[in-house]
Image: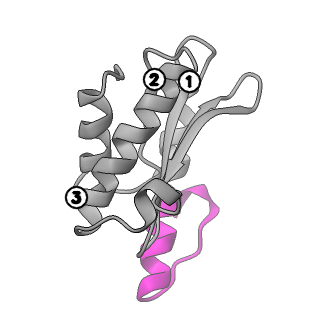
Amino acid sequence: MAYGTKIAKGDAYKRAAIKRRHTRIRKKVNGTAERPRLVVTRSNRHIVAQVIDDLKGHTVASASTLDTSIRGAEGDKSTQAKQVGALVAERAKAAGVEAVVFDRGGNQYAGRIAALADAAREAGLKF
């Protein structure tokens, strides 16, 4: 087993697999001032997106389902993820960011992760 993660059972196995994939991704994906990293963190209930400049170690923009503008919104979790994607893209563009590198955080590029990324692209962020 590579990347130093122990084998587990059930949900712990899923978390370990996500952690392994995220470690592999982070070896290759790095954010700079010109192209910061768009990080997506997903839980069962919420989704968080941050635009991070890794060279400075600063968060340029962020959005979440916990934001007051999205928190009471109607719709399923994929709809809320679309709203988060559009909001983080809007905030990133306001901060002067035009292009980002996408870090899916070890999650599969499907469902809420894909919905967030597609909404961010539609709002004008380049991947």
The answer to whether residue 7 is magenta is: yes
**Residue in the picture at 58% in, 25% down:** 31
- Cα separation, mark 2 vs mark 3, equals 20 Å
What residue is disc 2 on? 100
- In the image, what residue type sits under mark 1? Pro
- Cα separation, mark 1 vs mark 3, equals 23 Å
* Secondary structure mainly formed by the magenta segment: helix
Indicate which disc, 1 or 3, sits on the residue closer to the N terminus. 1
Q: Position of residue 101 (x, y in %)?
A: 45, 26
In this image, 63 relative to 124: left or right?
right
What residue is disc 1 on? 36
- Label 2 sits on a secondary structure element that is loop
- Cα separation, mark 2 vs mark 1, equals 5 Å
Residue 29 visible from this viewpoint: no
What's the magenta region? 1-19
Indicate which disc, 2 or 3, sits on the residue closer to the N terminus. 2
Whether the residues at callouts 2 and 1 have beta carbons within 8 Å, the answer is yes
Which residue is nearer to you in this view: 105 or 100?
100
What residue is disc 3 on? 111
The answer to whether residue 126 is magenta is: no
Q: Position of residue 90 (x, y in %)?
A: 43, 30
